Amino acid sequence: MAKTIIDKIWENHSVIQENNKPSLLYIDLHLLHEVTSPQAFAGLREKKRTVRRPDLCFATMDHNIPTKNRFVIDDSIALKQIQTLEENCKEYGIHLEGLHSADQGIVHVIGPELGLTLPGKTIVCGDSHTSTHGAFGALAFGIGTSEVEHVLATQTLWQQKPKQLQVKIEGKLGYGVTAKDIVLALIANYGTNAGAGHVIEFTGETVRNFTMEERMTLCNMSIEAGAKAGLIAPDETTYAYIKGKKYAPKDDEFDEKVNEWSGLRSDPDAVFDKTIEINAAQVEPMVTWGTNPSMGVGISEHVPSLNEVQSEKEKESIQKALAYMGLTPGQSLTEVPVQHVFIGSCTNSRLSDLKAAAEVVKGKKVHAEVQAIVVPGSQQVKAKAEEEGLHLVFKEAGFDWRDSGCSMCLGMNPDIVPEGERCASTSNRNFEGRQGKGARTHLVSPAMAAAAAIEGRFVDVRKFVSGLREGEAYAGI
Ligand SMILES: CC(C)[C@H](C(=O)O)[C@@H](O)C(=O)O
Ligand code: SF4
């Protein structure tokens, strides 16, 4: 029978598989961070168990850490979680990239960057955006803390096989349109439940033409479309990225692996439970206006007016979101002032994201009413950006240039958006209170965030880059 890549990885890892029952899956890589691991280790200790394969675990600290003066941790909970991770890794012999490490960074940025994330692997982490690693053709998904304990103890996990959704993306991206806009458009059109109970395989010409960093942005947000995971079959782009990475297979072993990986693709006649088709050419730069990632529009559109909506329930949810966001129905987002700009997070903090933002910022100044920060996804990204002088572009424009971490993506560290203030953010979640109590989050691409930092309000980056302002003739792309 024809198989999808998901079927193939599932079969390769099933230790126990019975019809219609959960399978016991072998886990190839277990990533750990400071927030979701402490109780798991405590549980192990209580039951007098040990870590079965410390060599298949890899830990970092990212959520709680400050991005400015990173060694001064004032918050007592953060400090405790960081120290606990250090102690646990030491006790159980798990490799940790701590605050002093040049390889530290957001867990989903460093896995790929260090060559730990490889095609065909099963990868888990106590973190929902583990889906990011699917960009390499790995089956990668987030797990809860009790599952973290189970994987630590057994290196396996019971899992019901999910359904499979194909998201086929064809067409050429317009100028100024990015992978972030594509995934925001997917979620805006099909909702935050589109992928519920499914793993997504992204296919199509547009995806094939994406770089690995773009593929990571796409897979990162598959979880916001409700999916358990998202993945992309590996190809030459994948192998070229992996080659030479610190922990990636080397020399002959690499060639053998490429041979093996090249079988990791869905058979031409494989059947999916569902297929969604996206025309990338129709997508424009996106901005979210509401309190979940599906509440988004193209920058030339406007916030929904209530008479456009049919159902009462939807009307209510829009009204509630707009009240929280301090917006009015039908408003154009280009008239909305922003006070904060955050370029970072596991969605958009890799070198190409910083380059795209720097391109927009170059030679310009951050608006007087805006506080803007750039937070590289890892210390390696930071170092590479500095080699290319990107930090100078940002600093000269008035951005703060920080150390790596989750930062303003979520209100768990000192980088908080104050109540009632608005942030153009390259992260992936815009829930109420996500960036701090009462904070208003708008999800955008790095280029759109950079343009908002300069103008002090949302602008269409396509017009901005070509030097035009609203009202001026625009020849298109
Ligand atoms: C803290 C962690 C459990 C959480 C997640 O699982 O996603 C965080 O990374 C997030 O993005 O909200
Ligand atoms: S950057 Fe944001 S989304 Fe990613 S792991 Fe950290 S908190 Fe979660």
Image (cartoon, rainbow, N blue to C red):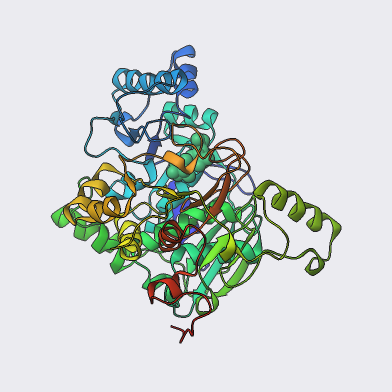
Q: Between residues 277 and 57, which one lies in front from this camera angle?
A: 277
Picture quarter with the C terminus: bottom left
Q: Position of residue 217 (x, y in %)?
A: 43, 58
Relative vertical location of residue 462 with respect to residue 254 in this rendering, above or below: below
**Quarter of the image holding residue 172?**
bottom left
Viewer-proximal residue among 381 and 93: 381
Residue shown at the point (53%, 74%) measured from the top left: 283
Using the rendered image of the protein, determine whether residue 461 is visible from the camera's viewpoint: yes
Judge left or right: residue 67 versus residue 244: right
Q: Which residue is at the front of the view, 25 or 276?
A: 276
Closer to the camera, 336 or 203?
A: 336
Residue in the picture at 52% in, 53% down = 338
Which percent across, then down, holds residue 199?
55, 56
The residue furthest right is: 312
Res. 249 in view: no
- The answer to whether 370 appears left or right of 68 in the picture is right
Image coords of residue 294 (percent x, y):
63, 58
